[in-house]
Structure formats: structure tokens, C-alpha cells
Image (spheres, helix red, strand yellow):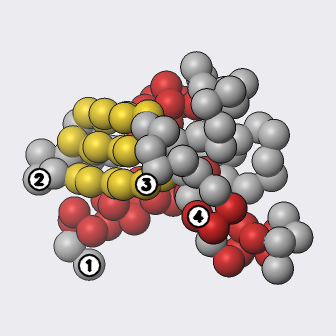
């Protein structure tokens, strides 16, 4: 595995440690991360959403994502883009998340 692929794996593993406090599933498995890009300089771009625009963590979750990813060795900077389109829905969750939440 090359360095960039290894760094991306560590980024995903970190995203899997961040939870929406109202749902016992991490943001990666919930499907809240729509896009994850990493350039050759170590800059990370995350396009993400929340379960709803009225989500109580709308102010705190994106900065938490940014701060946690910036702590990863090899990450230079992190840009988090909070989007509402397409709107999140249950189909965006992984099978694991659906199973954990009783949807399967």
C-alpha cells in the first residue's frame, strides 16, 4: 500500500470514530460523508452532510471532523464542506449501520 492510500485508510478509520451523538453509529457508516479527497500534499477535502438541517450538532460536528483529521500525521490541512444536497436518507447507510439500528 502506498503512502497516500495508507493515509486515506487512517483518515477513514478516524472518521469511523466520530459519532452523531443521537445515533450510535459513526458518521462513515451512517453515510454522512459524501466525498473524501486527498491530494499529494496531504490536504483533505470532506464533503459531508448531517441527518437533517435541524440536527443539533450542525455547529459542532463539522469542526470536530476538521480538528480530528488535522491531528493525523501526514495531513496538512482539512477542508470540510457541509452540504444538504442530496439530502441524507436511510439508504445511504452501510449494511452494518442498518443492521445495528435494526433496519435489516
Determine whether 15 is above or below 83 in the image: below
Give neighbour class at mark 3: few <14, some 14-19, many 20+ (Cα, 10 Å): some
Disc 4, SS:
helix
Upstream in sequence: badge 4 or badge 2: 2
Query: Do tag 2 and tag 1 residues touch (Cβ < 8 Å)?
Result: no
Could you tell whether 71 is left or right of 42 in the image? right
Q: Which residue is mark 1?
A: 1
Q: Which residue is mark 3?
A: 34
Residue 79 appears at what percent x and percent y?
31, 33
Q: Which residue is mark 2?
A: 40
Upstream in sequence: badge 3 or badge 4: 3
Upstream in sequence: badge 2 or badge 3: 3
Q: Residue at x 81, y 40 (%)?
A: 22
Give neighbour class at mark 4: few <14, some 14-19, many 20+ (Cα, 10 Å): some
Instruction: Identify the mark at residue 53; answer none if there is no mark.
Output: none
Q: Which residue is mark 4?
A: 92
Query: Do tag 3 and tag 4 residues touch (Cβ < 8 Å)?
Result: no
Give neighbour class at mark 1: few <14, some 14-19, many 20+ (Cα, 10 Å): few
Single out the mark in the foreground, 4 or 2.
4
Single out the mark in the foreground, 2 or 1.
2
Give neighbour class at mark 2: few <14, some 14-19, many 20+ (Cα, 10 Å): few
Spatial distance from mark 4 to mark 1, Cα to Cα? 28 Å
Upstream in sequence: badge 3 or badge 1: 1
Q: Residue at x 27, y 68 (%)?
A: 5
Amino acid at each position: 500500500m502506498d503512502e497516500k492510500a495508507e493515509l486515506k485508510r487512517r483518515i477513514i478509520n478516524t472518521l469511523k470514530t466520530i459519532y452523531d451523538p443521537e445515533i450510535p453509529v459513526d458518521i462513515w457508516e451512517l453515510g454522512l460523508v459524501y466525498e473524501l479527497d486527498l491530494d499529494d500534499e496531504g490536504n483533505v477535502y470532506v464533503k459531508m452532510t448531517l441527518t437533517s438541517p435541524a440536527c443539533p450538532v450542525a455547529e459542532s460536528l463539522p469542526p470536530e471532523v476538521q480538528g480530528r483529521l488535522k491531528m493525523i500525521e501526514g495531513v496538512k490541512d482539512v477542508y470540510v464542506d457541509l452540504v444538504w444536497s442530496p439530502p441524507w436518507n436511510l439508504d445511504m447507510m452501510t449494511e452494518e449501520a442498518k443492521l445495528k439500528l435494526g433496519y435489516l
